[in-house]
Image (spheres, rainbow, N blue to C red):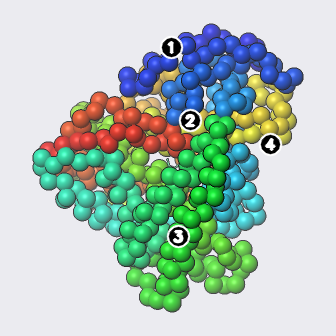
Amino acid sequence: MGTAKPLTGHPGFPALPSFPTPLRRFPRLTEHTMADAVVLEGAESTSDLLHLMPPLAAAGPTVRYVYGGLERILLNEPDEIRQVVSDPRREFPALGVLQRVLGQGLLAADDLDIWAPHRSVIQRGFSPRQVTAYAQRIEAVTRRLVESWSPGRQVSVRDEMSEWSLDNVGDSVFGDDFTTFRDAIRDQFRRTIHQTLAAMADIEAGTPKPGAEERLEQTISELEETVRHIVGRRQNGIVSARGLIDGMIEASQDGDPRYADPFIRDEVITMMFAGYDTLAVTASLSLFLLYTHPPVLKRVRSEAAEARATGIPVERYMKDLPYIRAVIHETLRLYPSIPFYHRPALEDRRIDGEWVKKGTILTASAWVTQRNPDYFPDPLTFDPDRWSTERRAAVVRNSYFPFGQGVRNCVGTHFSMLALAIVVAEVASTVNLIFEDEQPAVQANPTMHVANAMMATVGH
Ligand code: HEM
């Protein structure tokens, strides 16, 4: 790796603050540092990285930078990125705190002998037959929500989509028990997710707060109590609408040690943790982009109307409504819910022709890569037609990865895409939304979050 090239400016969204001199040359840090690095000045949180990282894409295939007191390497080549993102092993500084909450649940599992059997049970819970049942329930949740949006009402699309996501993910995880325990589940999960992500972001930034993990304990114990209660009820009672939890209970009842305690606890908490915010933020940004691009809205409405007229069942919306699918892909390109992966190299390895020592943090970023003009021309333009059959073939392999890559990709991908297709089709065909702000104020904490309420007035 040679000396980093001078950085060219990144157009950036107007809402993103500009930092006067974000970058300065940084000398070699260790004997293993082969090139100059750049320090990201003003980067105190992962959110700041959203604004500061995109220019680094222009600096070369690999760029050394310093953040959180650690020297890291940003990877800009899709094939190198794939190697990091698709590695099933888990080891990173904030893993300890994540495991305190999720145990060996899928997202946090570092023991692959535990992860593999768990993953197969969860995957069965997302089988096409199961997802068809979820689709009908997602449609009902979406209709109820849209019916409550009377003309003239002002709604926070961010908060409404958070409730919508909670209802859909909660329903898919807990089945019909979700309705009974909705308030407890919502409050306990919100607190747990918030506290855990904050602790992870602090660790990532090199500023862990003393006692943060201990404070989590109280919140987790309430959550565990709720989960235990629901499992107990379902073990003994009648189940009318199944959730993922029922597949877990069945697996554990065979006496197979791989599904012994705390399997159900870990996976139930994991599914809510992994699904709730990611789906909510993507849904609210999809609606925002849709309603701020009238020509796109017009085409979505026409496709949704055609689907209704020809009686396409909602469970086929993802497959059979290509334009709506493209709108969602384009939203996820601009706003991937997991914008950064910071993974230590698990062995000494060669990258871009140079040796990188084990432990060096490698950054792979969907946010940076999916906004890189080398891979997505005119990257800041919301252009769903990039995903048309003709143009999609030109997308560089491995340059788009909002659901991760490899065997540990998102287990909820199909469910999420379907839920998003349903909400986009339903909302677009029923109401008009006039958004107040010109841009969503996105943050990464470390997952994507929208700081403004995304207020909109409902029209016909
Ligand atoms: C738009 C919505 C979503 C996005 C963009 C998203 C994104 C991702 C990404 C990028 C990963 C890989 C993380 C990594 O490699 O470290 C992941 C993993 C995961 N996601 Fe999602 N996700 C979404 C919704 C959901 C939903 C709704 C669920 C469950 C109901 C879910 C459950 C999971 C689980 C359990 C994993 C860990 C998989 C494993 O390691 O085997 N996700 N997700």
Q: Which mark is residue 20?
A: 1
The CA distance from mark 3 to mark 2 is 29 Å
Q: CA distance from mark 1 to mark 4?
A: 36 Å
Tell me which label, 3 or 1, sits earlier in the chain: 1
Residue 323 appears in the figure: no
Which is closer to the viewer, label 4 or label 3? 3
Q: Amino acid at mark 4?
A: Leu
Residue type at numbered disc 2: Thr
Horizontal side, residue 148 vs residue 385: left or right: left
Q: Which residue is mark 2?
A: 46
Residue under circle 4? 346
**Marks 3 and 1, Cα distance to the nearest angstrom?**
46 Å
Question: What element does badge 4 sit on?
Answer: loop
- Distance from disc 4 to disc 3, alpha carbons, whole Å, reads 36 Å
- Do tag 3 and tag 2 residues touch (Cβ < 8 Å)? no
The residue type indicated by label 3 comes to Glu
